[in-house]
Amino acid sequence: MKRLLVLVAGFLMLCSFMVFAGGQDEEKSSGPREVKITLWARANEVEHMRADAAYDAVKLLNEELKNEGSNVTVVVEANYENPSWGDYKKKFTLAADAGEGPDIVLSGHEDIPVWANAEYIVPIADSVKDVKKLSPEFDDVIESLWTPCQWHGTVWAVPQDTEARPLFFSKTKLKELGWSDAQISDLPNKIKDGEFTLDDMIATAQKAIKAGVVEKGYGYWHRPRKGGDYLQYYFSYGGYLYDPAEDKLVVVKDALEKWYAFQRKCVTTGITPEKYIGTEWRVWHDTVSHNKALFWNGGIWQWADWAANYVKDEGGDKVLYKNVGYALQPTGIKGKNGGTLSHPLVYMMTSKSASGRAKADDEYVVRLLEKIATKEINTKHALSSTHLGILKSQINYEPYKSNKFLSDVTYMLDYNYYQPNHTMYGIYFDSVWNGMVAAETGEKTPKDAADQAVKQMKLELGDVLIVK
């Protein structure tokens, strides 16, 4: 009996040892671990920090993990390329369908609802309140920039940058036309306050052509190809795109027709060339940066491109400051404030099915995005690419604050608006774009083009559309 007890005790001790040893092996297996995070961005050489910011951020993250006593080291592989937006998005969706997408994808905020619906991306937080609790960096993000990162109240993305799309004007050409320095300096304020309208811009451009200050067709150059910039003139006449309470798209027919009439008037008055839509971007950039047009519609990010790639030999920034002024887009309604469209690019975290990433590693993706959103890293991008910062702390951060151009245009964020995050918005935009082209080229009258666009939207969008 005693011997049996001894054997049983020995067996139990052996089992305890095996369990303990197994525990040691388990602990050993959870030793140092490497988490790889991939990031894709569309960017040119000037905008490389959209991807390369991840390399600066991962150093901060790994230092933080080390201080926490974590056994995890994060490794980043960030890639950027500069195809068309359409080709870039197609590459991502094909990769996501195959489960071979990146862990983080950068794109326009309007892709959120489509990619969320397709389960390519997953939420960052349930609400703005929750996302701000995640980290001091997220709490520092300018409040209004969380709006385009949401879909149905859930936060699906983190802002990477934002911008404004000003009306640029030639200060030297206005001077030739007889404007005083004071009048030129005050033009942005007059546009902001609704005292200088789109009709005033057309009339001024006509005078400049008549006086020989600019050639015919060079009074006003808008964006030469398809893009959201054109919607600024729809807004200028009182239009808007979305009813958040109803979660429906909105078209204001009167504003649509007036916008189309403006586009056509630019051609019939001779301030914009005939058959202008489709002009090559390189031709457009070369023309406006070399002070050949009186007014033009562009984006603040183009300032850095012009300085580095078009007028570098003539003095870069210095020659631009000498020749070029910038303001909000003028209103079409006297007394109504000028405005601008902002189009934030955002980082989205992909799903397990899109990237193959383990769910447990989502934490490190979010924490990397937190570190990208620091004033030091975001300011690097802002300065090199002339984009506006995303953080409240950047406003008084000396390297950002001391940049004249960014300081001059930051106020425009107080007058901005966004395209809506809606799954059917692509259909809406195609309809209004096609109508605008038909009106500007004279294929249809502005009224007929607006009627056709609304008819098409009703057919394709149905109850999703509100017609005002």
Image (spheres, helix red, strand yellow):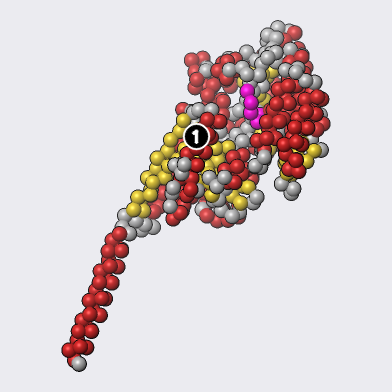
- Give the side of residue 312 with respect to residue 55, left or right: right
- Check residue 371 for magenta coloring: no
Q: Position of residue 74 (x, y in %)?
A: 38, 48
297 or 410, which is in the foreground?
297
Q: Residue at x 61, y 36 (%)?
A: 343
Q: Position of residue 79 (x, y in %)?
A: 43, 35
In the rendered image, the residue lying farthest to the left is: 3
Q: Residue at x 44, y 42 (%)?
A: 100
Q: In the rendered image, which quarter contains the N terminus?
A: bottom left
In magenta, the rendered stretch is 225-229
429 or 173, which is in the foreground?
429
Q: Residue at x 52, y 17 (%)?
A: 311
- Is residue 277 visible in this depiction of the protein? yes
- Give the side of residue 351 with respect to residue 2, left or right: right
Q: Residue at x 49, y 34 (%)?
A: 91
Q: How dense is the environment of label 1, judged by Cα within 10 Å: few (below 14), some, or many (20 and up)?
A: few
The answer to whether residue 242 is above or below residue 34 is: above
- Is residue 50 visible in this depiction of the protein? no
372 or 260, which is in the foreground?
260
Total marks shown come to 1
- Give the side of residue 339 with respect to residue 111, left or right: right
Q: Position of residue 71 (x, y in %)?
A: 34, 56
Q: In the rendered image, which quarter contains the C terminus?
A: top right
Q: Position of residue 341 (x, y in %)?
A: 66, 33
- Check residue 228 for magenta coloring: yes
The answer to whether residue 175 is above or below residue 85 is: above
- The residue at which mark 1 appears reads as 91
Q: Secondary structure at mark 1?
A: helix
The answer to whether residue 322 is above or below residue 90 is: above
What's the amino acid at mark 1?
Lys
